[in-house]
Protein backbone atom coordinates (compact mmCIF):
# COMPACT_ATOMS: atom_id res chain seq x y z
CA UNK A 1 0.00 0.00 0.00
CA UNK A 2 1.43 3.38 -1.06
CA UNK A 3 1.83 6.23 1.45
CA UNK A 4 -1.33 8.34 1.65
CA UNK A 5 -2.61 11.78 2.56
CA UNK A 6 -5.96 11.79 4.36
CA UNK A 7 -8.49 14.39 3.20
CA UNK A 8 -10.70 16.17 5.69
CA UNK A 9 -13.87 14.28 4.82
CA UNK A 10 -12.25 10.87 5.35
CA UNK A 11 -10.80 11.97 8.68
CA UNK A 12 -14.26 13.13 9.74
CA UNK A 13 -15.69 9.73 8.78
CA UNK A 14 -12.94 8.03 10.79
CA UNK A 15 -13.87 10.00 13.89
CA UNK A 16 -17.52 9.03 13.33
CA UNK A 17 -16.42 5.37 13.22
CA UNK A 18 -17.54 4.72 9.64
CA UNK A 19 -16.80 1.00 9.29
CA UNK A 20 -14.98 0.97 5.93
CA UNK A 21 -12.86 3.98 6.82
CA UNK A 22 -11.84 2.55 10.21
CA UNK A 23 -10.98 -0.78 8.59
CA UNK A 24 -8.83 0.95 5.96
CA UNK A 25 -7.04 2.97 8.65
CA UNK A 26 -6.21 -0.29 10.47
CA UNK A 27 -4.98 -1.95 7.27
CA UNK A 28 -2.85 1.06 6.38
CA UNK A 29 -1.32 1.30 9.86
CA UNK A 30 -0.38 -2.38 9.70
CA UNK A 31 2.06 -1.38 6.93
CA UNK A 32 2.89 2.24 7.79
CA UNK A 33 3.77 3.85 11.08
CA UNK A 34 1.71 7.02 10.78
CA UNK A 35 -1.10 8.74 8.93
CA UNK A 36 -0.29 11.86 6.89
CA UNK A 37 -2.62 14.85 6.91
CA UNK A 38 -2.08 18.34 5.58
CA UNK A 39 -1.98 21.50 7.61
CA UNK A 40 -5.12 22.45 5.64
CA UNK A 41 -7.02 19.42 6.96
CA UNK A 42 -5.69 20.19 10.44
CA UNK A 43 -7.11 23.71 10.12
CA UNK A 44 -10.47 22.52 8.76
CA UNK A 45 -11.04 19.98 11.53
CA UNK A 46 -9.74 22.24 14.29
CA UNK A 47 -11.82 25.24 13.23
CA UNK A 48 -14.97 23.13 12.85
CA UNK A 49 -14.61 21.58 16.31
CA UNK A 50 -13.85 24.93 17.93
CA UNK A 51 -16.85 26.52 16.21
CA UNK A 52 -19.10 23.78 17.65
CA UNK A 53 -17.43 23.94 21.10
CA UNK A 54 -16.87 20.19 20.77
CA UNK A 55 -14.25 19.94 23.51
CA UNK A 56 -14.24 16.14 23.83
CA UNK A 57 -13.88 15.67 20.06
CA UNK A 58 -11.27 18.43 19.93
CA UNK A 59 -9.15 16.62 22.53
CA UNK A 60 -9.48 13.32 20.62
CA UNK A 61 -8.41 15.05 17.41
CA UNK A 62 -5.42 16.74 19.06
CA UNK A 63 -4.35 13.40 20.56
CA UNK A 64 -4.66 11.79 17.11
CA UNK A 65 -2.49 14.47 15.51
CA UNK A 66 0.22 14.07 18.15
CA UNK A 67 0.74 10.50 16.93
CA UNK A 68 0.63 11.23 13.21
CA UNK A 69 2.21 13.58 10.65
CA UNK A 70 0.92 17.04 9.75
CA UNK A 71 2.47 18.10 6.46
CA UNK A 72 3.04 21.85 6.03
CA UNK A 73 2.57 24.11 3.07
CA UNK A 74 5.95 24.58 1.48
CA UNK A 75 7.17 26.72 -1.36
CA UNK A 76 7.04 23.64 -3.63
CA UNK A 77 3.48 22.87 -2.50
CA UNK A 78 2.35 26.41 -3.26
CA UNK A 79 4.01 26.39 -6.69
CA UNK A 80 2.32 23.09 -7.58
CA UNK A 81 -1.01 24.33 -6.21
CA UNK A 82 -0.82 27.61 -8.12
CA UNK A 83 -0.03 25.73 -11.35
CA UNK A 84 -3.08 23.49 -10.74
CA UNK A 85 -5.23 26.52 -10.03
CA UNK A 86 -4.14 28.28 -13.25
CA UNK A 87 -4.67 25.16 -15.40
CA UNK A 88 -8.14 24.52 -13.95
CA UNK A 89 -9.18 28.17 -14.41
CA UNK A 90 -7.97 28.24 -18.01
CA UNK A 91 -10.14 25.26 -18.93
CA UNK A 92 -13.12 26.75 -17.09
CA UNK A 93 -13.19 24.12 -14.33
CA UNK A 94 -11.82 25.80 -11.21
CA UNK A 95 -11.46 24.00 -7.90
CA UNK A 96 -11.69 25.80 -4.58
CA UNK A 97 -8.46 26.90 -2.93
CA UNK A 98 -8.67 24.45 -0.02
CA UNK A 99 -8.86 21.45 -2.35
CA UNK A 100 -6.13 22.82 -4.62
CA UNK A 101 -3.80 23.20 -1.63
CA UNK A 102 -4.58 19.69 -0.35
CA UNK A 103 -3.88 18.29 -3.84
CA UNK A 104 -0.62 20.27 -3.92
CA UNK A 105 0.45 18.75 -0.59
CA UNK A 106 -0.29 15.25 -1.91
CA UNK A 107 1.56 15.82 -5.18
CA UNK A 108 4.59 17.52 -3.63
CA UNK A 109 4.98 14.66 -1.15
CA UNK A 110 4.24 11.89 -3.70
CA UNK A 111 1.22 10.66 -1.73
CA UNK A 112 -2.07 9.07 -2.74
CA UNK A 113 -4.98 11.28 -1.67
CA UNK A 114 -7.64 9.41 0.28
CA UNK A 115 -10.90 11.31 -0.12
CA UNK A 116 -14.65 10.88 -0.32
CA UNK A 117 -14.80 13.97 -2.58
CA UNK A 118 -13.65 12.20 -5.71
CA UNK A 119 -15.37 14.71 -7.99
CA UNK A 120 -13.27 17.54 -6.54
CA UNK A 121 -9.97 15.81 -7.32
CA UNK A 122 -10.68 13.37 -10.16
CA UNK A 123 -9.32 15.52 -13.00
CA UNK A 124 -6.12 16.73 -11.38
CA UNK A 125 -3.26 15.50 -13.53
CA UNK A 126 -0.85 13.22 -11.71
CA UNK A 127 -2.97 12.93 -8.56
CA UNK A 128 -3.84 9.40 -7.50
CA UNK A 129 -6.97 9.13 -5.36
CA UNK A 130 -8.66 6.45 -3.27
CA UNK A 131 -11.99 6.48 -1.49
CA UNK A 132 -11.74 4.52 1.75
CA UNK A 133 -15.44 4.93 2.48
CA UNK A 134 -16.20 2.57 -0.43
CA UNK A 135 -13.43 -0.01 -0.09
Image: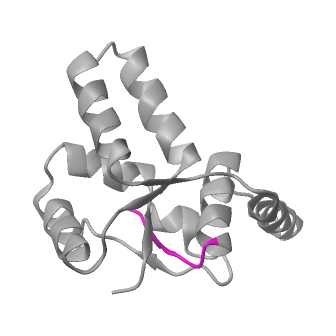
Q: Position of residue 28 (x, y in %)?
A: 25, 74
Residue occupying the point 79% across, 65% down = 76
Name the image quarter holding the N terminus.
bottom left
Q: How many marks?
A: 0
Examine the rendered structure and indicate whether residue 121 appears above or below residue 97: below
Residue occupying the point 61% across, 54% down = 99
The reply to whether the magenta stretch includes residue 115 is yes
Q: Is residue 43 left or right of residue 114?
A: right
Q: Is residue 43 left or right of residue 57?
A: right
The reply to whether the magenta stretch includes residue 126 is no
Q: Which residues are magenta?
A: 109-116
Residue placed most toward the observer, 11 or 33: 33
- Does the magenta stretch mainly form a helix, a strand or a loop? loop
Q: Position of residue 112 (x, y in %)?
A: 48, 77
Examine the rendered structure and indicate whether residue 33 appears above or below residue 50: below
Residue 135 makes an appearance in the image: no
Residue placed most toward the observer, 49 or 73: 73
Residue placed most toward the observer, 33 or 57: 33
Name the image quarter holding the C terminus.
bottom left
Q: Is residue 9 left or right of residue 95?
A: left
Residue placed most toward the observer, 126 or 34: 34
Residue occupying the point 64% across, 74% down = 107
Residue 97 makes an appearance in the image: yes
Amino acid sequence: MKPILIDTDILSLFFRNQHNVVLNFKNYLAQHEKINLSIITYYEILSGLKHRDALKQLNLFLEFTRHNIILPLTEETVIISSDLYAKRRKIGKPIDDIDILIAGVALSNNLVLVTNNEDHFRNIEGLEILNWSLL
